[in-house]
Amino acid sequence: MSKRNRKVAAIVTVAAAAVFAGPAHAQEEIRLGSIATLEGPFASGGQDGHRGITLALEEVNYEINGKKIVWTAESSNAQADVALARARKLIEQDQVDIIVGPLSGAEGIALRDYSRTLTGKTIVNGSSAASDTTLRDPSPNFFRFSTEGAQWMAGLGNYVFQEMGVEHVAVIANDYAFPYAQVFGFMVDYCRAGGKVTKLWSPLGTTDYSSVITRIPRDAGALLVIKGGTDALAFLTQYAQTGGELPIIGGSIMADQTLMSARGPHQRLMEGMISAGPIADIHDDPMWQEWVERYRERFPDGLQSPSIHGFNYYTNTKAILLALQEVGGDLSDNQQKFQQALANLEFKNPMGATVKLDENRQAISDIFFTRIVKTDDGLRTESFGRADGVDQRLGLSPEEFEKLGSPSRDNPSCPPVS
């Protein structure tokens, strides 16, 4: 072969290798995609979710076993069809290996269903918290290392009835999957204790709550408000402006820095608010204190304390990295070793709570009771109790739990189905 022909052959060989390399990127790099709500009513939560991902990736310097982690971020708006379109783009165009996300409940169910159509790909939840995402008809390659909406409310119903003496609660909630889970988690205990519940639903993105406020029963002893972002701010502001005085029991995304740091008449109602969930601003565990300090140093323009979304996205991304470290970044064989490592993980999240998965690849972990207190830095949540190792059945036997049925706008009722 002539010198010229040898040179041409070498060029063709290199070009062919580049064209036919296909999934070889998995041997050289790990492609991570993310979906968070950077548009719509939960935009501030999505931004904090990105901060959580960033903290986790910076801990490993964007590298596992010599393989660079390439992160591609996509935005959604809390709508399932938009989240699904972003996920397809990440898989089909960006050829990511793993997706972390989404943030909202209906989005999570959509991505759970989409994950069933994929081979050799993994979706790990961001912060979405609808119960049915993992509780019923779970997908073998959808994992959630954050607890979900019903788990977050475990034990709070008993506290409200027994300790606060509230016998009738008016529920003010958005009409979609995540609030159904939160109401379910609260009512299972509250109804069995003897409580009465009136439910007042409104669509996500509602701005005028005058008709909801006029329908609050006169004998209600407290409001259980399960809203987040701009929806929560709009309702509380309007309720305060009408002179509303009922104690507020908050859904888990109500006790959040994005709401407590906003100025306005709603702050009068928030001080003293009882809630429950996976985090608290003021918590005496050294792991939490160190992590919050690191968050503040890294994001001086972020929140005073990480939000539930920043915490959840960090926890789920951390799980991805721990599993990748265990298998040396090996995503071969349709990610079987990686997914097995995910399923067997047990670690502590920043609150110092142990996280492990059940048979549906859903987190079992601790839930914290919180109270909003006024400090020199403004309103903060402070932990005052906890429920250890809460699973999706809320401590009930499989038979008892199955009788309750799936969370919905009408289920459960008081007393719950038995």
Image (tube, rainbow, N blue to C red):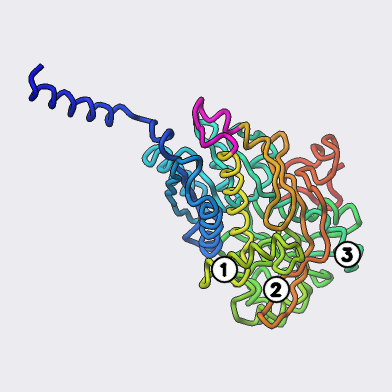
Of the two numbered discs 3 and 1 in the rendering, the one whose residue sits closer to the viewer: 1
Label 1 amino acid?
Thr
Circle 3 residue: 167
* Prevailing SS of the magenta stretch: helix
In terms of secondary structure, where does tag 1 sit? Answer: helix
Decide which of tag 2 and tag 1 comes sooner along the chain: 1
In terms of secondary structure, where does tag 3 sit? Answer: loop
Q: Is residue 334 magenta?
A: yes
Q: Position of residue 285 (x, y in %)?
A: 75, 62
| Residue at horizontal 50 percent and vertical 40 percent from the top | 65
Horizontal side of residue 157 vs 352, given as left or right: right
Q: Tag on residue 230?
A: 1
Q: Mark 2 and mark 3: span between their CA atoms?
A: 27 Å
Q: Which one is nearer the viewer's eye here, 231 or 26?
A: 26
| Residue at horizontal 66 percent and vertical 49 percent from the top | 146
Q: Position of residue 155 (x, y in %)?
A: 83, 56
Q: Which one is nearer the viewer's eye here, 18 or 81?
A: 18
Label 2 amino acid?
Arg
Decide which of tag 3 and tag 1 comes sooner along the chain: 3
Q: Classify 10 Å Cα crowding around label 2: few (below 14), some (14-19), many (20 and above).
A: many
Circle 2 residue: 380
| Residue at horizontal 59 percent and vertical 48 percent from the top | 318
The range drawn in magenta is: 326-339
Of the two numbered discs 2 and 3 in the rendering, the one whose residue sits closer to the viewer: 2
Label 3 amino acid?
Glu
**Image quadrant containing the N terminus:** top left
Q: Are discs 3 and 1 less than 8 Å apart at CB?
A: no
